[in-house]
């Protein structure tokens, strides 16, 4: 997922394993969201993060997506929302 590559490029603190973990976390979060009937919320969250992604002094900034990520977390169980957020902000 290019989002994980973008995160690693921004933080400049990613090993190949870190990028793979990010991809795995996003894929797991997507699978769990689909299983829980939350595809729309997942799609909205990922679209927002992709649109709002900004790198500021080596930190990922997607603060404009809190509402979408919170909606994903409310629709799914808490670990799925945290998994998604961790993949982006880890």
Image: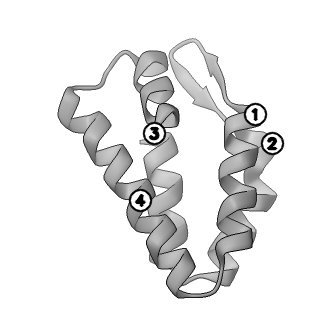
Secondary element type, mark 1: helix
In this view, the mark in front (4 or 1)? 4
Check contact, mark 1 vs mark 2: CB within 8 A: yes
- For the residues labelled 1 and 3, the Cα–Cα distance comes to 16 Å
Q: Disc number at residue 1?
A: 3
Q: Please, which residue is most extreme toward the top here?
A: 57
Disc 4, disc 2: CB below 8 Å? no
Q: Distance between the residues labelled 1 and 2?
A: 7 Å
x, y percentage for residue 35? 51, 85
Q: Which of marks 1 and 2 is nearer the N terminus?
A: 1
Q: Which of 47 and 58 is in front in this view?
A: 47
Lower sequence index among marks 4 and 2: 4
Q: Residues within 10 Å of mark 3 (few under 14, many from 20)?
A: few
Residue depicted at x 45% and y 39%? 1
Instruction: Compare marks 4 and 1 and give the one earlier in the sequence.
Output: 4
Quarter holding the C terminus is top left
Label 3 SS: loop
**Camera-nearest label, 4 or 2:** 4
Residue 16: which quarter of the image?
A: top left
**Where on the picture, by quarter, is residue 62?**
top right
Q: In this view, does 32 lie to the left or right of 73?
A: left
Q: Name the residue under label 1.
A: 52
Q: Which mark is residue 64?
A: 2
Q: Neighbour class for label 1 at 10 Å: few (<14), some, many (≥20)? A: some
Q: Is mark 2 on a helix, strand or loop?
A: helix
Q: Mark 4 points at which residue?
A: 27
Tell me which numbered mark, 3 or 2, is placed earlier along the sequence: 3
Q: Residue furthest bottom?
A: 36
Which of pointers 1 and 3 indicates the residue nearer the eye? 3
């Amino acid at each position: 997922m290019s989002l994980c590559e973008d995160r690693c490029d921004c933080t400049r603190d990613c090993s190949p394993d870190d990028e793979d973990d990010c991809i795995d976390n996003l894929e797991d979060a997507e699978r769990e969201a689909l299983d829980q009937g939350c595809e729309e919320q997942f799609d909205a969250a990922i679209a927002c993060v992709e649109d709002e992604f900004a790198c500021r002094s080596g930190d990922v900034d997607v603060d404009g997506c809190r509402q979408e990520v919170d909606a994903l977390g409310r629709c799914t169980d808490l670990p799925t929302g945290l998994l998604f957020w961790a993949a982006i902000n880890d």
